[in-house]
Image (tube, helix red, strand yellow):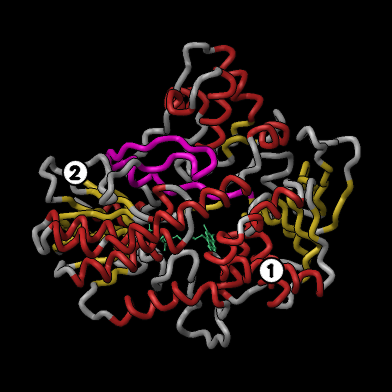
């Protein structure tokens, strides 16, 4: 199969890009692992489910409009249940081969331009007990509620520093679940700093209204929302039974001597998000480190073109900034691809992108304030770690053994060399979950920047492929 523009990911960035690309006369193909479009923010229930009032808050309205518009465009080719495992470039930049694993095995797609929009995932945070069954990413808990209409636990506790945990706690309460509390590491006054600028509030009214309504419903349901506290340990024999939390003093130090235990069988962790850059790395796209805006994020120009000619990037992999920015970036990226393929002139796309650019600029300002406020701080992450905690859960490499490896091998100064010697990052998840911590720990230990430590080399397949499917390939 051949296409002009292959878009990897059918979230807001991918959907907006598909619409813009198709309107500019391109043959567009969108590939997504999920069964339906919408991405993380609009994870849809299966078609067999009858769901009333699905994501009815005003804040989802714009993304849902985009979803309807994109779904109705019959000219867009959608490939669902399909994971792109590699982007191969034979050296000629308008001829890429995508290796796609789907329900019927592995297939190839030839594309003149590729747009990577794979979104982000919850940032894993290391603390004693973090690998106990029952400890989950808040986004993972939310996926059960949004998509499967299922409350995956009896008694939830949410801990972190990102406001999304209020939304997820509210969705659990609305769905009939019990929430023992929502705990923020920041002070209440730091969170309220967002309200200081009336312009910021007015311009982002829907988001503030959603969080305000969620807080109101949580208070009504008797769910305590506390500040200046953090998780220090998850407890249980084989499964989570309680969480130990501790206050954080004004100097940022965790008061580990005045802890308290909260009974729960699900612990939602919500300290922020990491950009899903593994496929971009594999394709040779350059990334830079930004601890607060997604870890490794992709470099791009004003048309969202990456450092690899012919490959563009949009959405959360360019920096965590929310669904609205993702959609606008997708649109601009598609215009860039269309003009480079000659289906529209540069003047035309320059005109078309004036408004999206203005909107992105304004929204990015808010996104920056939000990421700044939601960032837990390196000091907190450092204090939560302990030697016995698994840094890489796939290969069961503890923080202690990783540091010992570094002490014994002072010549090891990059994430890649540390991976070879320690095995951290060699497991099933291909380092998705430990890469951020490995980079952070090494930079701290060696006193150098994370960009110097570098990332793990991203290998084929970027997404897991069944061995029997691989064997069928020539
Ligand atoms: C778990 C989670 C829950 C979230 N919930 C909310 C929320 O409730 N409200 C909110 O405002 N924001 C939420 N966010 C943030 C939200 O995801 C983004 O702001 C927005 O969806 C970003 O759009 P995107 O197009 O960049 O990526 P996404 O919406 O994440 O879309 C990316 C798509 O790419 C697909 N994909 C990734 N890799 C591949 C591959 N190799 N092959 C094929 N397909 C691939 C994924 O299946 C996904 O559908 C959430 C984020 C996460 C991680």
State the residue at coordinates (33%, 67%): 16
Who comes first in sequence, dot 2 or dot 1?
1
Identify which residue, 229 or 33, lies in the foreground.
229
- Please provide the residue range marked out in magenta: 271-298
Residue 447 in which image quadrant: top right
Image coordinates of residue 51 in percent, x first then y, are 55, 85
Camera-near label (2 vs 1) is 1
Q: Is mark 2 within 8 Å of ligand 1?
A: no
Residue 285 on the magenta span: yes
Image coordinates of residue 73 in percent, x first then y, are 26, 79
Image coordinates of residue 406 in percent, x first then y, are 56, 17
Q: Are marks 2 and 1 in contact (CB under 8 Å)?
A: no
Q: Residues within 10 Å of mark 2 (few under 14, many from 20)?
A: few
Q: Report if residue 77 is visible in the image.
A: yes
Q: Is residue 173 left or right of residue 12?
A: right
State the residue at coordinates (31%, 56%): 469
Q: Is residue 343 left or right of residue 429?
A: left
Badge number at residue 309: 2
Total marks in image: 2
Image coordinates of residue 263 in percent, x first then y, are 85, 57
- Residue position for label 1: 212
Instruction: Assign a secondary structure to mark 2.
Output: loop
For the N terminus, the quadrant is bottom left
Q: Is mark 1 within 8 Å of ligand 1?
A: no
Vertical arrangement, residue 440 with respect to residue 26, above or below: above
Identify which residue, 201 or 228, lies in the foreground.
201
């Amino acid at each position: 199969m051949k296409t002009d523009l292959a878009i990897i990911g059918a979230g807001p960035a991918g959907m907006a890009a598909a619409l813009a690309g198709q309107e500019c006369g391109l043959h567009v193909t969108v590939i997504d692992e999920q069964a339906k479009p919408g991405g993380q923010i609009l994870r849809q229930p299966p078609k067999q489910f009858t769901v009333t009032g699905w994501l009815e808050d005003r804040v989802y309205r714009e993304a849902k409009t985009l979803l309807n518009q994109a779904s109705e465009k019959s000219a867009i080719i959608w490939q669902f249940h399909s994971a792109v495992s590699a982007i191969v470039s034979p050296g000629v930049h308008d001829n890429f081969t995508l290796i796609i694993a789907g329900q019927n095995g592995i297939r190839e797609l030839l594309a003149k331009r590729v747009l990577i929009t794979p979104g982000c995932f919850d940032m894993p945070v290391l603390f004693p007990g973090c690998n106990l069954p029952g400890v989950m990413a808040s986004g993972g808990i939310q996926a059960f509620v949004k998509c499967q209409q299922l409350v995956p636990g009896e008694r939830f506790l949410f801990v972190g520093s990102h406001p999304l945990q209020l939304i997820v706690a509210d969705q659990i309460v609305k769905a009939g679940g019990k929430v023992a509390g929502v705990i923020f590491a920041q002070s209440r006054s730091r969170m309220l700093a967002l309200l200081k600028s009336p312009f910021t509030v007015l311009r982002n009214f829907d988001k503030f209204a959603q969080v305000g309504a969620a807080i109101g419903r949580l208070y009504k349901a008797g769910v305590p929302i506390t500040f200046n506290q953090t998780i220090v340990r998850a407890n249980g024999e084989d499964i989570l039974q309680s969480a130990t939390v501790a206050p954080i003093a004004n100097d940022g130090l965790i008061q580990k001597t005045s802890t308290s235990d909260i009974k729960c069988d699900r612990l939602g962790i919500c300290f922020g998000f990491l950009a899903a850059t593994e496929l971009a790395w594999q394709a040779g796209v350059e990334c830079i480190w930004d601890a607060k805006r997604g870890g490794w994020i992709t470099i791009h120009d004003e048309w969202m073109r990456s450092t690899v000619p012919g490959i563009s990037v949009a959405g959360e992999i360019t920096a965590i900034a929310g669904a609205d920015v993702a959609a606008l970036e997708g649109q601009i990226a598609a215009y860039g691809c269309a003009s480079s393929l000659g289906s529209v002139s540069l003047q035309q796309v320059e005109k078309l992108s004036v408004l999206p650019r203005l909107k992105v600029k304004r929204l990015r300002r808010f996104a920056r304030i939000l990421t700044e406020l939601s960032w837990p701080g390196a000091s907190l992450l450092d204090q939560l770690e302990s030697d016995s905690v698994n840094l890489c859960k796939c290969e069961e490499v503890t923080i202690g053994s990783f540091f010992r490896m570094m002490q014994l091998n002072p010549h090891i100064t990059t994430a890649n060399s540390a991976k070879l010697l320690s095995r951290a990052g060699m497991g099933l998840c291909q380092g998705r979950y430990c890469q951020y911590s490995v980079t952070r720990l090494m930079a701290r230990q060696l006193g150098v920047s994370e960009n110097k430590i570098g990332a793990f080399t991203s290998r084929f397949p970027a997404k897991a492929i069944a061995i029997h499917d691989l064997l069928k390939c020539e």
